[in-house]
Each structure stands twice: as structure tokens, then as C-alpha cells.
Image: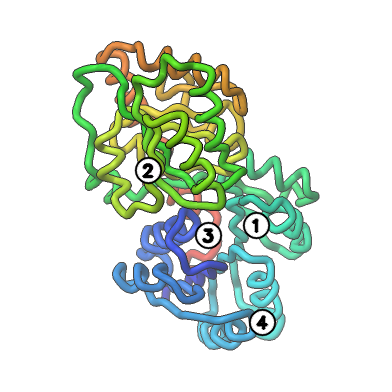
Amino acid sequence: MKPAFLYVLHSGNLYGTERMALATLDGLRDRLEPVLFAPPGPALGEAERLEIQAVEFRGARDLAIKLRPWIARHRRLAFAATGVSHSIIFLAWNLLYGRRNVHIHLVHGGTDERESYGRKRMLNGRGIRFVAVSEFVRDRLLAHGVAEAGIDVCENFLPDRQIADVPRRPAFREGVRNVVVVSRVDPIKRIDLLLDCLDRHPVLKGLNFRICGTGWDLEVLRARAEKDHPNVVFEGFSDRIPQILAGSDLLLHLCPCEPFGLAILEAMAAGVPVLVPDAGGAASLIEPGISGFQFRAGDAGDLGTVLEEVASLPPASLDRIAAAADARLRERYSSKAGLERYARLFKELADD
């Protein structure tokens, strides 16, 4: 019998954390029996579509009840959690059952430092491996007291099937004209920085900016754009992001403290160049001037300068950037690369 791979999510949505959980479960099913535990939401439906066993739970007590039979009937277990309480529940049950296991705790980061990083140190010294999705997340864990020896960095990845099937932008025939931002419109994401930049760089009025996402700042920033920058359109939520990316010339990412940035990988897969801050997890995803572009994080003036430079590049230069990004994606952020990092964590569960 293969070891079970029990993966517990704190959310049933289908954002980056949930999509990575499903990609990891699906990618390791030849070695481990995948099971997803999640609150109500579309993640459970996607698991069923992928023929991954899915268990719905509502709250910590319900999770504890539903985890127990899986732990009871499997001699070997891989366990992954995104919430501290979920890891504690597994530790408690395993005191009773004493199963051979590899227990990893996924840290994707977030807007609340205490919830995203600070509480994790409660799990120090309990035989748990912390999995940070970027060096930036690793550094935040260290800053909040998580033991360095217990942290592994396993960067997010795109499934090879997604890379192969995604709509792709054709080769450039002219320079950058259509820029897309795929992001929540919350204060920490710094969408306001784009409008500050356009205030200072009126020459950029020839570019079209499309903001896909919703959040606390949506209506305020939409009103500001309608008043001062009609070339910026806030579209709200969209379920057509792959098609929108393929119809764009540049993906702009603005958050200076993004833990990773899965939309950046999706742009690479679509053949769309990316412009990111030089800070946070997003900064490590590209090589400046080779596979993408960078601006000084939080600096509206520098953002405008770089946008002007990128907009003036000839099509051949943009095609070279997109080709280099595609190569980087396939080498570092493909299923093979991403799953191998996880497989190494679970190798001790291999059959005797």
C-alpha cells in the first residue's frame, strides 16, 4: 500500500495556495495516495475533477474527527498543513497511533505578519519541516523566530499540463501597448502606485492598463482612474485570466512584499514579459534585463521611468525577453523541478 498523502487547507478557495496543493497532490500520486481536506469551496470540486479524494470539514473539531480514520489505517503518512491548528491536530493523533510520517507545514505568506509567520514558531522542535515558497518567506519566518534548521524552500511551480495548454501570446509586431495587472486590489498590493506613477509620467497615457482583481481599494482607485487616467480600467474579478494574459503585452506586478507571485509564472507561460518590484518573492522569479524587468519597489518615479523604457523596446528585444522567461519557467518552475523538491522531503517514506 502506498503511503497516504493528507493535505489540509485552511481555505476552500482556488487561489495560489489551493492550486499548489492540488498540483502537488496530483503530481505525486504515483508515489503517494492523495487526499485533500478543505473547508467548503471550489477546491473540493477541483480535487474531484482531478480524481483526488476530497474530504470537506468545518472547523478544527470536525477536521480532527475526519482525520482520525486515515491516520488509523495507514502505517506510513505524508502530512501537509497550511494552518497551525491543523498541524497540532495531526501531532495529537500521532501521539496515539505512532505512525511513520513526514510532516510538512506550508508557508505561503500573506498580509498578516502574525498569522502568516509569527504563530509558526509554536511548531518549533516538533519534528515538522517548514516549507517556504520563496527565500523571502524563509527570511520572514526567521525574523519571527522559526528555527532555521527546520526550514526548506520549495518554490511554487506550474503543472506541465498547464504550461502546454495555456493560450500564448504571438510574437511581437510592435512595442508594448497593453499592460495587465492581475492582483487583489488591497492596500498591501500597491495598485495605487500605478496611478501615482501616471500622475508623474503623462507620456504613459499612450499605454492601456487593465486591472483584473477585486478588493478593499477597488472602488476608490476605480473612481480615481476614471477621473484622472481613463487609460486605466479596473475590471474586477475575471475568470478569463489566461485569455487576458495572452492578449496583453506586459504583466505589471506592484506588491513589494509578495511572498511569491503565481501570476508571474502564468505570464511567462503565456509568452508575456513581466515587470516586477526589486523586493519580495516576486523579485527572485526573473533575471532583470534577461527574463523580465524590475523597478525600485514602492518608487512611483522609477516605475514610470522603467515603463517608458520597456515601452520603447523593439519587438525583437521583447521576444528575446519572453523566450528567456519561458526557458527559466521550464527549467526552474515546471512540474519536474517543483515536484522533485517535494519528493526529496518525502523520500524516507519509500517502501522498505
Mark 2 or mark 4: name the one nearer the start of the chain: 4
Residue type at tag 2: Ser
Q: Nearer the viewer, residue 189 or 7?
A: 189
Residue pointed to by mark 2 = 334
Residue pointed to by mark 4 = 93
With respect to residue 33, does 247 lie above or below?
A: above
Residue pointed to by mark 3 = 346
With respect to residue 176, does 248 lie above or below?
A: below
Residue type at tag 4: Trp
Mark 1 residue element = strand
Mark 1 or mark 4: name the one nearer the start of the chain: 4
Q: CA distance from mark 4 to mark 3?
A: 20 Å
Q: Which mark is residue 129?
A: 1
Residue located at (54% from left, 70% from top): 8
Percent coordinates x, y for residue 250 in the rendering: 36, 29
Residue type at tag 1: Arg
Left-right relation of 27 to 186: left
Q: Nearer the viewer, mark 2 or mark 3?
A: 2
Left-right relation of 138 to 177: right
Q: Classify mark 2: residues with Cα within 10 Å, few (<14), some (14-19) or many (20+).
A: many
Percent coordinates x, y for residue 182 in the rendering: 42, 42
Q: Classify mark 4: residues with Cα within 10 Å, few (<14), some (14-19) or many (20+).
A: some
Q: CA distance from mark 1 to mark 2?
A: 23 Å
Percent coordinates x, y for residue 127 in the rendering: 71, 63
Residue located at (19% from left, 29% from top): 170
Q: Classify mark 1: residues with Cα within 10 Å, few (<14), some (14-19) or many (20+).
A: many
Residue located at (39% from left, 53% from top): 237
